[in-house]
Image (cartoon, grey):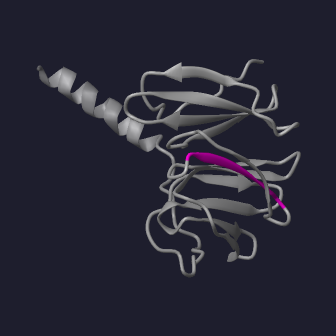
Amino acid sequence: MNWFALLSLCSAAACLRAQEPATLKLSSTIALPGVKGRIDHLAIDAKGNRLFVAALGNNTLEVLDLAMGKSLKSVAGLRKPQGVLYLAAPNRIGVANGDDGTFKLFDGASYESLKNFGSLGDADNVRYDPAEKRVYVAYGGDQEGGMAVVDATSMKRPDDVAKLDAHPESFQIAVSR
C-alpha cells in the first residue's frame, strides 16, 4: 500500500470516528429485589413509563416504574419467561414461556391473567403487527418450530403462520407505508 492510500484511509477513519454518536452513560439503576438468574427480553409502556422485564432465571415478569425508579410488581407463576410484549390499546402484557410452551396475556392494570395459549414448545420471541392487530409468537426446538398467531382484539388463536424446520430465534414485522 502506498503512503497516499494509507493517509487517505487514516483520514477517512478519523472522519468516521468524529461522526460517531456520544457514548451511552448510565443515568440511574432500578433494583430488582429478590430476582435471581438471568433476564431475557424487555418491553416498554412509553405512555405509562413502565418497563416489563422477562426474568427468565426467576420465573417472573418484573414491572418497573421508570419515572419513580422503582419496582412496581413481580408477576409470579411463569415458566422460563422469554419474550414479552406490551399492547397499549387494550393495555395488555403478553409473555412467551419457554419451559411450559405457553403464551400468556395479562391485564395491564391489575396484572391478572386473562388468557393462556398452549402447545407452543419453547415459546420465545413475540412481535405485534398493529395494522393487523395480531401477535406473532415464535416457538419450537432444534428439529421443528413455528409461528403462532394470536388475534389481539378477540384474544383467540386463529392459526399458525407456518411450520418451520427449526426454532425461529428472531424475527421482525415488516411495516408497509
Of residues 22 and 45, the one drawn nearer to the viewer in this rendering: 45
The percent position of residue 153, horizontal first and vertical second, equals: 87, 37
Q: Is residue 145 above or below residue 102?
A: above
Which quadrant of the view contains residue 28? Answer: bottom right
The percent position of residue 71, horizontal first and vertical second, equals: 67, 76
Main secondary structure type of the part rendered in magenta: strand
Q: Is residue 8 above or below residue 108?
A: above
| Residue lying at 38% horizontally and 28% vertically, measured from the top left | 143
Q: Residue furthest front?
A: 119
Which stretch appears magenta?
101-108
The percent position of residue 115, horizontal first and vertical second, equals: 78, 49
Residue 124 visible, this orientation: yes
Q: Is residue 104 magenta?
A: yes
Residue 172 visible, this orientation: no
Whether residue 42 sits left or right of residue 38 in the image: it is right
Q: Is residue 176 above or below residue 15?
A: above
The percent position of residue 6, horizontal first and vertical second, equals: 19, 27
Q: Is residue 60 magenta?
A: no
Of residues 119 and 107, the one drawn nearer to the viewer in this rendering: 119
Whether residue 122 sits left or right of residue 92 in the image: it is left
| Residue lying at 56% horizontally and 41% vertically, measured from the top left | 125
Q: Quadrant of the N terminus?
A: top left
Of residues 85 and 65, the one drawn nearer to the viewer in this rendering: 85
| Residue lying at 82% horizontally and 26% vertically, measured from the top left | 131
Whether residue 58 sits left or right of residue 53 in the image: it is left
Of residues 141 and 168, the one drawn nearer to the viewer in this rendering: 141
Q: Residue furthest left?
A: 1
Q: Quadrant of the C terminus?
A: top right
| Residue lying at 34% horizontally and 39% vertically, measured from the top left | 14
Q: Is residue 114 above or below residue 69?
A: above
Which quadrant of the view contains residue 73? Answer: bottom right
Q: Residue furthest bottom?
A: 33
